[in-house]
């Protein structure tokens, strides 16, 4: 009996030892030490050291224990010198190609600083660009935002853009990505006239009271005639821009990113091939989890199967858009906007509920994860009702990890229903920072604005949530998201807290850009926390976000980004 008890004791000791390390092997390739290591595990433990072997984490714990077990003569020792090591950030909603086109190849008019632009400064930037437009080319720009323009809601028209040029076609996409502006030359070349019918999917060619086209376009289907006439960028230029964009994403400490709309900017098959070629030729410095753009999928398409790919590039979902932009006054609300006064505008749904359900069901039944853009509470109602029907009879709805993108204007009942269905909201947390004052003071009023991005409400109900940029809608900066989620301070003076009761702890906000975001993309078994057996995807920060004042977390410098135990350069 004594022998059996001793053997049992030794077996237990062995089990405990193996829980903190992996199976015996020569030694670690790298040991990090000398600064706090934020594991973001289930206990939110902060440890002293981490060991990497073969691109995976093999040990976390005290420096003495990790070194004793894993340090050899060939182990590279990296002294953090007080800097902080934590999991690489995970960005679950980025338009990578859209960002490359908008910021790398087009004229980037985005302005996330103060003071705001005016119509005059915007027109001046457009004129300055004209000299670089080749014969037969278009002036394409991104980032105009009336809600962040002086005066408030000043909006470009075709007549305004004609002041820039009447011979060069101009096409501008609003910062939200849901509104466009064109001059009369662009309307002519695209063949859009007063008699042109609005396209399905929520598209609108806006007209004035006299029935004349204003040059304003609502929702992406209305962009199609113009994009079809624009010369495609040379393949080499596009690839260069994508590489630059992914390097920029990596420089923000992001190690895994979504591509949320494969097929939105050009034919689906072309973009699938482009991503596969980039991955095969080491053209992606970050991991990518790709979502096909639902309306772009040809009938009967079977070129990609759910979960096809590897750890570098994997196709996991299909994404739909149910409404527009809240700051653009096109998101579908249950009650009218507050701006302008006495308006009856509630925005509109892009699809009928049954129509959208039938589109989603095709891919849900195939095993794809479904993600739906829903900014307004009417769109959220539609999406949740469709999800409830898709999940009917499913004893474990959380296994499908259905996503709602943005979940901006919402109700407490919607939060409860989303949690019950296992739905994961991805909050564009920049809504609080860059647009918080406009939402609160003008667009939807204090009551609805204070519930935007309801992080604390989801936590209270026991649900998960993640933060993202929706780049190019806002800048990629997970440290900024942590500040925004924990502080909820809007940018424009006088600065105020938007919805104080929706603030979460810094630890909760960190989870929203690491393990929760990884969970949202079916990757939490391999990334999102620093635990034995996971990929060594790491970020080294100049300071510890857990001990930095909330509003200063955004200013912490990303020193290094590591993927598979390899330091990245950009």
Image (tube, grey):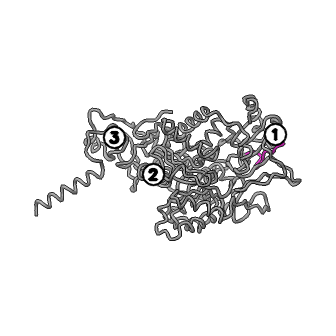
Q: Which residue is more in the foreground, 80 or 4?
A: 4
Separation of disc 3 and disc 2 at Cα?
20 Å
Residue 161: percent from left, percent from top: 80, 40
- Residue range highlighted in magenta: 149-159
Magenta span includes 151 = yes
Above or below, 331 relative to 148:
below
- Tags 1 and 2 in contact by the CB under 8 Å rule? no
In 3D space, how far apart are the residues under numbered discs 1 and 2 (Cα atoms)? 47 Å
Tell me if 157 is positioned left or right of 456 in this view.
right
Distance Cα–Cα, label 1 vs label 3: 59 Å
Where is mark 3, residue-wise?
53
Name of the residue lying farthest toward the left: 2
Quarter of the image that includes the N terminus: bottom left
Instruction: In the rendered view, tell whether residue 315 sits above or below residue 404.
Output: above
**Closest to the observer: 316 or 60?**
316
Residue 212: image x %, image y %? 86, 50
The first of marks 1 and 3 along the sequence is: 3
Q: Earlier in the sequence, mark 3 or mark 2?
A: 3
Q: Residue 319, how many percent across, how many down?
A: 59, 54
Which residue is at a point 65% across and 58% down the rendered structure image?
A: 322
Is 205 in the magenta? no
The residue wearing badge 2 is: 523
Q: State whether the magenta stretch is mostly helix, strand or loop.
A: loop
Q: Which residue is mark 1?
A: 185
């Amino acid at each position: 009996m004594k022998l059996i008890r001793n053997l049992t004791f030794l077996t237990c000791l062995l089990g405990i030892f193996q829980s903190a390390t992996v199976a015996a092997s020569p030694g670690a390739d790298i040991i990090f030490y000398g600064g706090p290591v934020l594991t973001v595990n289930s206990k939110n433990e902060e440890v002293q050291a981490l060991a990497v072997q073969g691109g995976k984490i093999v040990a976390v714990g005290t420096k003495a224990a990790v070194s004793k077990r894993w340090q050899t003569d060939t182990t590279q020792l990296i002294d953090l010198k007080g800097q902080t090591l934590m999991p690489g950030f995970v960005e679950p909603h980025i338009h990578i190609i859209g960002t490359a086109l908008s910021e790398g190849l087009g004229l980037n008019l985005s302005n996330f600083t103060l003071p705001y632009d005016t119509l005059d400064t915007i027109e001046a930037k457009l004129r300055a660009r004209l000299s670089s437009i080749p014969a037969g080319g278009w002036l394409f720009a991104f980032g105009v935002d009336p809600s962040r323009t002086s005066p408030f809601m000043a909006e470009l028209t075709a007549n305004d853009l004609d002041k820039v040029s009447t011979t060069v076609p101009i096409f501008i996409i609003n910062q939200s990505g849901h509104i466009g502006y064109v001059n009369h030359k662009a309307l002519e070349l695209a063949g859009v006239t007063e008699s042109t019918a609005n396209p399905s999917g929520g598209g609108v060619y806006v007209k004035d009271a006299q029935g004349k086209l204003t040059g304003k376009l609502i929702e992406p289907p209305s962009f199609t005639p113009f994009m079809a006439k624009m010369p495609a960028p040379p393949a080499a230029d596009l690839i260069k821009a994508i590489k630059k964009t992914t390097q920029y994403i990596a420089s923000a400490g992001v190690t895994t990113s979504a591509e949320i709309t494969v097929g939105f900017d050009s034919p689906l098959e072309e973009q699938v091939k482009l991503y596969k070629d980039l991955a095969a030729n080491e053209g992606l410095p970050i991991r990518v989890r790709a979502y096909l753009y639902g309306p772009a999928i040809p009938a009967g398409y079977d070129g990609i199967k759910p979960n096809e790919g590897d750890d570098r590039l994997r196709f996991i979902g299909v994404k739909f858009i149910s409404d527009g932009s809240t700051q653009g006054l096109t998101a579908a609300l249950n009650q009218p906007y507050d701006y302008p006064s006495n308006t009856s505008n509630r925005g509109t749904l892009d699809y009928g509920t049954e129509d959208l359900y039938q589109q989603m069901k095709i891919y849900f039944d195939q095993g794809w994860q479904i993600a739906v853009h829903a900014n307004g509470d009417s769109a959220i109602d539609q999406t949740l009702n469709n999800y409830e029907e898709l999940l009917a009879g499913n004893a474990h709805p959380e296994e499908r990890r259905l996503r709602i993108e943005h979940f901006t204007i919402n109700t407490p009942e919607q939060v409860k229903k989303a949690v019950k269905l296992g739905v994961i909201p991805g909050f564009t947390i920049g809504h609080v920072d860059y647009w918080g004052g406009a939402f609160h003071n003008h667009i939807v009023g204090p009551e609805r604005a204070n519930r935007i991005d309801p992080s604390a409400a989801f936590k209270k109900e026991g649900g998960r949530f993640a933060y993202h940029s929706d780049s190019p809608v806002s800048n990629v900066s997970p440290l900024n998201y942590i500040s925004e989620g924990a502080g909820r301070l809007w940018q424009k003076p006088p600065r105020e807290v938007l919805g104080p009761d929706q603030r979460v702890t810094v630890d909760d906000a960190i989870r929203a850009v690491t393990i929760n975001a990884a969970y949202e993309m079916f990757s939490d078994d391999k990334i999102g926390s620093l635990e034995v057996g996971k990929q060594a995807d790491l970020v080294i920060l100049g300071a510890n976000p857990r001990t930095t004042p909330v509003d200063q977390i955004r200013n912490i410098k990303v020193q290094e980004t590591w993927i598979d135990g390899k330091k990245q350069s950009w």
